Image (cartoon, rainbow, N blue to C red):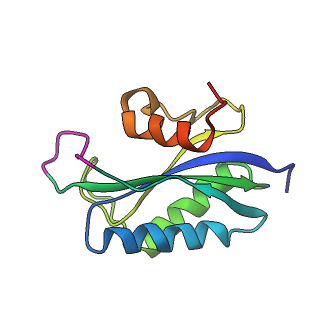
């Protein structure tokens, strides 16, 4: 495992026990190898983004410090989503949990299935608010 890096991961849920899914996802991320949960933003209730009609989301951002690589972290986050009942059948569909790597240190990554910083960051005001809450000096 590499040198620890600060990573910002966005959490979202709009099915079932939304707050419970966020809590279980935080617990699972904190238990990842070489990873510490450093901080978490306030939880926000937000309107869904995208073309599919669905319920409101609870959203939150967490700051992790991890030795995992971006690809390793992505694979672990996808496993957490799967374990918490996430089904990927339609893009933008309602989901029990959504975990997105928003920033990973100062890295820029453009690989199949993994783009960092997250390409939707500029379009998500709530992500920007949550990042500002966790890292107010990062601009």
- The answer to whether residue 67 is left or right of residue 137 is right
Determine if residue 112 is in view: no
The residue drawn where x is 22% and y is 46% is: 47
Residues shaded magenta: 46-53
Along the line of sight, which residue is nearer the eye, 75 or 134?
134
Left of 56 or right of it: where is 30? right
Q: Position of residue 16 (x, y in %)?
A: 26, 73
The relative height of residue 71 versus residue 82 in the rendered view (above or below) is: above
Check the image and name the residue furthest to the left: 53
Front-lying residue, 81 or 64: 64
Q: Count up the numbered dots.
A: 0
Q: Is residue 28 visible?
A: yes
Report if residue 52 lies within the magenta region: yes
Residue 79: image x %, image y %? 53, 67
User: Which residue occupies 27% across, 61% down?
Assistant: 14
* Position of the C terminus by quadrant: top right
Give whichever of 84, 105 is nearer the camera: 105
Is the residue 7 above or below the residue 119 in the image? below
Quarter of the picture containing the N terminus is bottom right
Relative vertical location of residue 99 with respect to residue 130 in this rendering, above or below: below
Residue 101 counted in the magenta span: no
Judging depth in this view, the residue of 74 and 14 nearest the camera is 14
Percent position of residue 29, x then y? 61, 66
Image location of residue 6, percent across then percent down: 72, 46
- Dominant secondary-structure state across the stretch colored magenta: loop
- What residue is rendered at 55% in x and 50% in y? 9
Instruction: Report the residue at 65% width, 55% height from top.
Output: 73
């Amino acid at each position: 495992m590499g040198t620890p890096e600060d990573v910002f991961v966005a959490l979202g849920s709009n099915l079932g026990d939304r707050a419970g899914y966020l809590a279980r996802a935080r617990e699972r991320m904190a238990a990842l190898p070489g990873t510490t949960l450093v901080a978490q933003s306030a939880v926000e209730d937000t309107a869904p983004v995208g073309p599919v009609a669905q319920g409101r989301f609870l959203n939150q951002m967490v700051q992790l410090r991890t030795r995992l690589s971006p690809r390793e972290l992505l694979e672990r986050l996808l496993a957490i989503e799967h374990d918490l009942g996430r089904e990927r059948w339609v893009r933008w569909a309602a989901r029990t949990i959504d975990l997105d790597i928003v920033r990973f240190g100062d890295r820029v990554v453009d690989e199949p299935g993994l783009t960092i910083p997250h390409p939707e960051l500029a379009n998500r005001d709530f992500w920007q608010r949550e990042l500002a809450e966790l890292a107010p000096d990062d601009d």
